[in-house]
Image: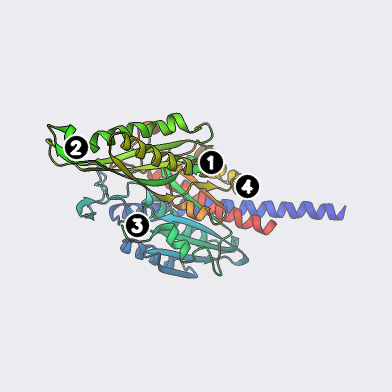
């Protein structure tokens, strides 16, 4: 009887402690929301491309130091920042990640804090914009940093804050992104995390949280095809071998790989040609044509199979015209995989912190994320946060990477509370185990 009473009292105390930190996170989030919005507007107006986030990383590092972080390391994977926040109680380490880079996109939103930044990208002068929402990711994670730094007494362990550069890819001939951070040891050492969480904003209802166990976002691989023929006069095509006609037929044939050759009831896949370049005059059949594209898959075996079919299709179609095709597939990022056990454990947090308790399981997203490299190393959960403009249907909102992409500031506190809740929930769960 005494033992039973003790167990009941212990459970009540644990529930009380849990309720206490949840309430404190909610209150603290409300207190930091205005600052989070200000930070988001600052980052949005001052975007920098991958591996060049110098001013961005300095502002982040200065902010973390102002919050009394135990350590702040700069220059990780070129411009990344890693902050360590120790709780008042011993325990393991959990990691939270946000990406930092903008895109070579000229902004057209007309917002008062719209980016006016320009730079040179691949030899061309272009605008720079946070067209994928990384400005929101950084501001949200800095909000989490402020929330958790004010309640160290509720942290049984350590929280590692990872601000990652070059998620959209580093400049040519440079390493970067999550892969380089891992190579440099961000997941190892004294504060090696046992789990990692992250989020991405999408043009869905503001404040809704989206997630999916296992494969949430696709593997993305680069495709390059060079079709070689024999140059001749445009008026006498029989005098050469036309690589343009061959390339056109290759494009058509590639579409049958997904639609006719692989079992897409197992997992979705996409093969897209995004550029085709060849020739410089209307009356000259050129010697060669170059095409670039992307391959998206969710299954490792299917990934290898699609790559092989793309190569075989391009080569055989080119040969039927008397041309040749050189196919190169550059492995990009793997599938963003959410650990199913971790996802199930954290689902109540997502439900509790989403706007209107709207945490929804979604279909796979064909977009890709290099958070996947972290998820390949340790248990991970990556979620989506809706940021669509009020009164605009999600299907009518500008997509990520659009010059009109919009982030609803009203959604930001939901991101802060979600990431704060995930970190504390995981740390407290390890204490119970």
Q: Quadrant of the C terminus?
A: bottom right
Name the one closer to the observer, 363 or 346. Answer: 363
In space, the residues marked 2 and 4 are separated at their CA atoms by: 60 Å
Name the one closer to the observer, 264 or 390. Answer: 264
In space, the residues marked 1 and 4 are separated at their CA atoms by: 12 Å
Foreground label between 3 and 2: 2
Q: Which mark is residue 170?
A: 3
In space, the residues marked 3 and 2 are separated at their CA atoms by: 40 Å
Q: Secondary structure at mark 1?
A: loop
**Residue at x-position 32% and y-position 64%:** 54
Q: Are marks 2 and 1 in contact (CB under 8 Å)?
A: no
Q: Position of residue 76 (x, y in %)?
A: 41, 66
Residue 376 placement, left or right of 37: right
Among the two numbered marks 2 and 1 on one chain, the one whose residue lies closer to the N terminus: 1
Residue 393 visible? The answer is no
Q: Secondary structure at mark 3?
A: loop
Q: Secondary structure at mark 4?
A: helix
Q: Position of residue 139 (x, y in %)?
A: 40, 54
Q: What residue sits right under mark 1 in the picture?
A: 212
Q: Does residue 158 lie above or below 297 as drawn?
A: below
Q: Position of residue 37 (x, y in %)?
A: 37, 51
Q: What residue sits right under mark 2 in the picture?
A: 240
In space, the residues marked 2 and 1 are separated at their CA atoms by: 53 Å
In space, the residues marked 1 and 3 are separated at their CA atoms by: 28 Å
**Residue at x-position 48% and y-position 39%:** 208
Foreground label between 1 and 3: 3
Q: Secondary structure at mark 2?
A: loop
Q: Are marks 3 and 2 in contact (CB under 8 Å)?
A: no
Among the two numbered marks 2 and 4 on one chain, the one whose residue lies closer to the N terminus: 2
Name the one closer to the observer, 143 or 394. Answer: 394
Using a 10 Å C-alpha cutoff, classify the residue at mark 2 as few (fewer than 14 neighbours), some (14 to 19) or many (20 or more).
some
* Residue occupying the far top of the picture: 260
């Amino acid at each position: 009887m005494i033992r039973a009473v003790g167990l009941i009292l212990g459970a009540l105390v644990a529930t009380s402690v849990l309720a206490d930190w949840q309430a404190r996170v909610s209150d603290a989030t409300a207190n930091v929301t205005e600052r989070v919005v200000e930070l988001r507007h600052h980052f949005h107006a001052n975007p920098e491309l991958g591996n060049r986030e110098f001013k961005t990383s300095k502002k982040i590092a200065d902010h973390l130091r102002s919050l009394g972080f135990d350590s702040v390391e700069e220059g990780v994977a070129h411009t990344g920042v890693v902050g360590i926040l120790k709780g008042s109680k011993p325990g393991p380490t959990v990691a939270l990640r946000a990406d930092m880079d903008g895109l070579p996109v000229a902004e057209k939103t007309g917002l008062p804090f719209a980016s006016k930044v320009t730079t040179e990208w691949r030899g061309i002068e272009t605008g720079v914009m946070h067209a994928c929402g990384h400005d929101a990711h950084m501001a949200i994670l800095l909000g989490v940093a402020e929330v958790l730094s004010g309640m160290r007494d509720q942290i049984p362990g350590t929280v590692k804050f990872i601000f990652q550069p070059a998620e959209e890819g580093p400049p040519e001939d440079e390493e970067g992104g999550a892969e380089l951070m891992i190579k440099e040891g961000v997941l190892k050492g004294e504060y090696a995390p046992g789990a990692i969480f992250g989020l991405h904003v999408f043009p869905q209802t503001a404040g809704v949280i989206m997630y999916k166990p296992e494969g949430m976002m696709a593997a993305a691989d680069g495709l390059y095809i060079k079709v070689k023929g024999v140059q001749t006069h445009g008026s006498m095509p029989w005098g050469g071998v036309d690589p343009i006609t061959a390339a056109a037929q290759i494009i058509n044939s590639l579409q049958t790989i997904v639609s006719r050759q692989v079992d897409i009831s197992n997992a979705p896949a996409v093969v897209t040609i995004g550029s085709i370049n060849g020739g410089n005059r209307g009356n000259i059949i050129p010697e060669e044509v170059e095409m670039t594209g992307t391959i998206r898959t969710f299954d490792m075996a299917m990934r290898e199979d699609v790559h092989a079919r793309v190569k075989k299709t391009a080569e055989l179609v080119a040969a039927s015209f008397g041309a040749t095709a050189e196919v190169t597939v550059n492995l990009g990022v793997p599938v963003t995989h959410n650990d199913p056990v971790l996802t199930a454990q954290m689902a109540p947090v997502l439900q509790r912190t989403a706007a209107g308790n709207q945490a929804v399981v979604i279909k796979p997203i064909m977009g890709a994320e290099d958070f996947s490299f972290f998820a390949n190393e340790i248990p991970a959960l990556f979620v989506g946060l809706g940021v669509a403009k009020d009164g605009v249907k999600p299907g009518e909102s500008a997509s990520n990477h659009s010059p009109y992409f919009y982030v609803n500031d009203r959604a930001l506190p939901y991101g802060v509370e979600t990431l704060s809740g995930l970190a504390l929930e995981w740390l407290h769960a390890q204490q119970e185990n």
